[in-house]
């Protein structure tokens, strides 16, 4: 799949004050083998103050850091960096140690995970990113006269996931804390007051990606966050022009910029509902398999496998039916998503599971009147 994606430059100036820097840390769940995580450097050539959103994986930090510093003023110029982390995964926080070692005044902000304190368990190890301050809803950082960035909590991909609204400043007199000042040591300023803003874009982290779909730790929270983002994109778009709404772009943590964030959020919501319908229809036995590029013998084998199953199916068996168009290397991630769907439907009384001791024997539909449309062929092709 990655070979079909458009190439992205290592460094790209998206706007006069937003630069995307590739992490160079590809992984099987990232959307491109040649890009990995997107870091976003925000600032103006006339300012010594910068905001950085996300870093890279630990193994890629040296080349990533070289790209980053090429975008910053060279020594002995004073450079103040505020680092905002969208969430705790290793491909986003692995560059914190090298950044802090060379910029001792670095300020780090991340929503504190429910299961951690100063360390974060990433998928490649445990990282101590302390000291950092936890983020709260609507917390805002400013580069005076240039831009503001506002935090919006968007759990789902992880419990500590945060997106950031990028805006042009319309009210710079929001610092009500007498202990804060406009000295270089305190800029960008972290505010607790929601300010009036003219939105430019939303940094969507791993909630909405530039290509493909995202994985999640809580389906219920993820759908809620997608709906929240869709409403924000739509509201901001309408506020810019009531007659002809102007699309607000999404700047994702993986993949290319998305010109219309509202449309992509809606696609994600629809896709998740389609996947839920596919799971239900598979359990009911009226799911039509995706067209496959496999040989006819492979397709015959899959058809026989499906027909040999009873009314109950394990999550893995559902994956093998619904995700025939997705490369096998991603089936473990797909299975986690299917389990999230099944657990959601179980809470709603739509499906149930049979167990033999601790072993899961399979899932079955309890309420045939809910969900599914019996016409699932080709929906969501190639995506988790």
Image (spheres, rainbow, N blue to C red):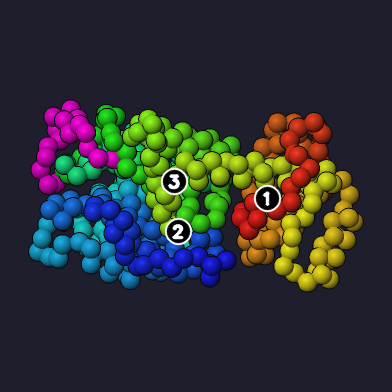
At mark 1, the secondary structure is: loop
Which residue corresponds to the image point at 36% horizontal and 54% vertical from the top-left?
A: 54
Residue under circle 1? Answer: 379
Residue 255 circle label: 2
Q: Which of marks 2 and 1 is nearer the N terminus?
A: 2
Q: Which of marks 1 and 3 is nearer the N terminus?
A: 3
Q: Is residue 43 left or right of residue 327?
A: left
Can residue 69 be seen in this snapshot?
Answer: yes
Mark 1 and mark 3: Cα distance apart in space: 21 Å
**Where does the image place residue 299, in percent across and percent down from the top left?**
81, 65
Q: In this view, does 164 lie above or below 4?
A: above
Which residue corresponds to the image point at 43% horizontal and 58% vertical from the top-left?
A: 256
Mark 2 and mark 1: Cα distance apart in space: 22 Å
Tags 1 and 3 touching, CB below 8 Å: no
The answer to which image quadrant residue 65 occupies is bottom left
Give the main secondary structure, helix, strand or loop, of the magenta stretch: loop
Which residue corresponds to the image point at 28% horizontal and 40% vertical from the top-left?
A: 167
User: Is 172 colored magenta in this rendering?
Assistant: yes
Residues drawn in magenta: 167-185
User: Is 177 colored magenta in this rendering?
Assistant: yes
Residue 260 circle label: 3
- Comparing 275 with 79, the one in front is 275
- Comparing 41 with 78, the one in front is 41
- Comparing 223 with 247, the one in front is 247
Mark 2 and mark 3: Cα distance apart in space: 14 Å
Q: In this view, does 379 lie to the left or right of 263?
A: right
At mark 3, the secondary structure is: loop
- Comparing 354 with 232, the one in front is 232
The answer to which image quadrant residue 74 occupies is bottom left
**Where does the image place residue 77, in percent across and percent down from the top left?**
10, 60
Q: Is residue 141 above or below residue 100?
A: above
């Amino acid at each position: 799949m990655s070979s079909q994606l458009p190439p992205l430059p290592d460094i790209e100036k998206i706007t006069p004050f937003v630069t995307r820097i590739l992490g160079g840390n590809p992984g099987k769940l990232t959307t491109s083998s040649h890009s990995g995580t997107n870091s976003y450097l925000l600032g103006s050539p006339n300012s010594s103050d910068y905001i950085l959103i996300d870093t890279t994986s630990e193994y890629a930090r040296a080349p990533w850091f070289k790209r980053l510093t090429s975008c910053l003023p060279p020594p002995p110029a004073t450079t103040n960096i505020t680092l905002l982390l969208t969430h705790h995964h290793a491909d986003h926080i692995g560059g914190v140690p090298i950044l802090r070692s060379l910029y001792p005044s670095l300020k780090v902000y991340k929503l504190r995970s429910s299961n951690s304190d100063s360390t974060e368990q990433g998928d490649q190890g445990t990282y101590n990113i302390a000291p950092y301050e936890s983020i709260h809803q609507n917390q805002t950082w400013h580069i005076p006269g240039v831009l503001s960035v506002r935090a919006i909590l968007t759990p789902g991909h992880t419990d500590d996931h945060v997106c950031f609204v990028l805006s042009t400043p319309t009210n710079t007199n929001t610092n009500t804390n007498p202990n804060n000042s406009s000295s270089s040591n305190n800029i960008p300023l972290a505010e607790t007051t929601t300010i009036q803003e003219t939105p430019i874009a939303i940094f969507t982290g791993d909630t909405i990606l530039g290509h493909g779909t995202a994985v999640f730790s809580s389906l219920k929270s993820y759908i809620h966050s997608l709906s929240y983002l869709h409403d924000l994109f739509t509201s901001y778009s309408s506020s810019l022009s009531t007659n002809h709404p102007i699309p607000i772009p999404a700047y994702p943590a993986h993949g290319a910029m998305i010109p219309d964030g509202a449309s992509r959020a809606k696609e994600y919501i629809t896709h998740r509902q389609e996947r839920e319908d596919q799971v239900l229809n598979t359990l009911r036995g009226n799911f039509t398999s995706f067209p496959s590029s496999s040989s006819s013998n492979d397709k015959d084998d899959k058809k026989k496998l499906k027909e040999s199953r009873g009314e109950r199916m394990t999550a893995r068996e559902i994956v093998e039916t619904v995700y025939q168009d997705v490369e096998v290397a991603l089936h473990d991630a797909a299975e986690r998503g299917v389990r999230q769907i099944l657990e959601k439907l179980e809470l709603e009384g739509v499906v149930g599971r049979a167990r033999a001791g601790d072993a899961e024997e399979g899932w079955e539909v309890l309420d045939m009147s809910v969900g599914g449309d019996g016409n699932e062929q080709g929906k969501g092709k190639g995506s988790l």
